[in-house]
């Protein structure tokens, strides 16, 4: 079992839809949870970062961490065609330096 | 301010040749990381540098891979005797010291081994 599992999709939604992206993980030592957005042929861009459990909101984006279920989510409200990208979840142990990534979910938002 | 830069953006090489990939971190970022992204896969950690400390090489897949960093500036990743399975995008990231939770990535070098 990989440490971080993420459904690769693709996920296609119409403009304005609410999008839910998820990852599960197996290592209970993970304390830092990140979501990166990667456009085609570009490097990943940090979107959201959460420490331990809880929710975090930033504009149209909400990140949730449920450590009891080892499950993290990213919600995108009022999705836009410009949100079309691959979304990568990443995690880190308390004292670790390496980020452990999921495979990424490819999202397409049609206008 | 400039972000992380990498060169070349694309590299095509023949099997068995050596390649060198370059990374220029964000100014003031003392931590530097290399990752590999194979097609359809997540990023895999390769190596981590922090200042003048010994690097964490735990992610390097074989002894054909090596990396150097001079002080807190440019880093080079070298792959010797390249194999077709080395074909991937090689991504560099940097962060402030102790802030591995906030890594900023470069655009990557797309390596194709024929």
Image (cartoon, rainbow, N blue to C red):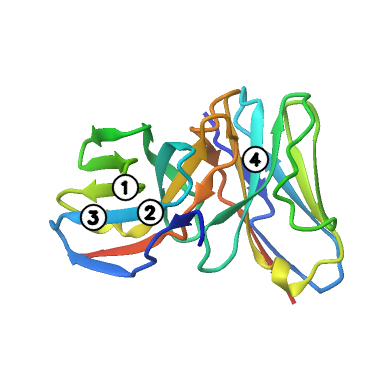
Total marks placed: 4
Tag in front: 3 or 1: 1
Rendered image quadrant of residue B74: top right
Q: Residue at x 31, y 59 (%)?
A: A84
Q: Mark 3 and mark 2 in contact? Answer it, CB < 8 Å.
A: no
Distance, label 3 to label 1, CA atoms, is 17 Å
Query: Please, what secondary structure does the residue beneath circle 4 have?
Result: strand
**Residue picked out by circle 2:** A24
**Residue picked out by circle 4:** B33
Task: Count neighbours of disc 3 (C-alpha within 10 A) and say few if under 14, some if 14 to 19, many if 20 or more.
Answer: few
On the image, the x and y values in percent for residue B50 come to 70, 28
Task: Count neighbours of disc 1 (C-alpha within 10 A) and say few if under 14, some if 14 to 19, many if 20 or more.
Answer: few
Left or right of A25 in this view: B54: right
Q: Are marks 1 and 4 on the same chain?
A: no
Q: Quadrant of the C terminus of chain A?
A: bottom left
Q: Are marks 4 and 3 on the same chain?
A: no
On the image, the x and y values in percent for residue A30 come to 47, 39
Query: Please, what secondary structure does the residue beneath circle 2 have?
Result: strand
Q: Mark 3 and mark 1 in contact? Answer it, CB < 8 Å.
A: no
Rendered image quadrant of residue A99: top right
**Residue picked out by circle 3:** A20
The numbered mark at residue A69 is: 1
Distance, label 1 to label 2, CA atoms, is 8 Å
The numbered mark at residue B107 is: none
């Amino acid at each position: 079992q990989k440490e971080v599992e993420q459904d690769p999709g693709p996920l296609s939604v119409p403009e304005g839809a609410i999008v839910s992206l998820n990852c599960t993980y197996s290592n209970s030592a993970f304390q830092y949870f990140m979501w990166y957005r990667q456009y085609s042929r570009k490097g990943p861009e940090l979107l959201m970062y959460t420490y331990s459990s809880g929710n975090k909101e930033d504009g149209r984006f909400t990140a949730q961490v449920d450590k009891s279920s080892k499950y993290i989510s990213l919600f995108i409200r009022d999705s836009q065609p410009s949100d079309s990208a691959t979304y990568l979840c990443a995690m880190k142990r308390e004292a670790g330096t390496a980020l452990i990534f999921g495979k990424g979910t490819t999202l397409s938002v049609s206008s | 301010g400039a972000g992380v830069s990498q060169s070349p953006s694309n590299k095509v090489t023949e099997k068995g040749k050596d390649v060198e990939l370059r990374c220029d971190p964000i100014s003031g970022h003392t931590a530097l990381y290399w990752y590999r992204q194979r097609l359809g896969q997540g990023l895999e950690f390769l190596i981590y540098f922090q200042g003048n400390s010994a690097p964490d090489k735990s992610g390097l897949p074989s002894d054909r891979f090596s990396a150097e960093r001079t002080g807190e500036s440019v880093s080079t990743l070298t792959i010797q005797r390249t194999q077709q399975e080395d074909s991937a995008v090689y991504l560099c990231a940097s962060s402030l010291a102790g802030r591995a939770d906030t890594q900023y990535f470069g655009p990557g070098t797309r390596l194709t081994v024929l």
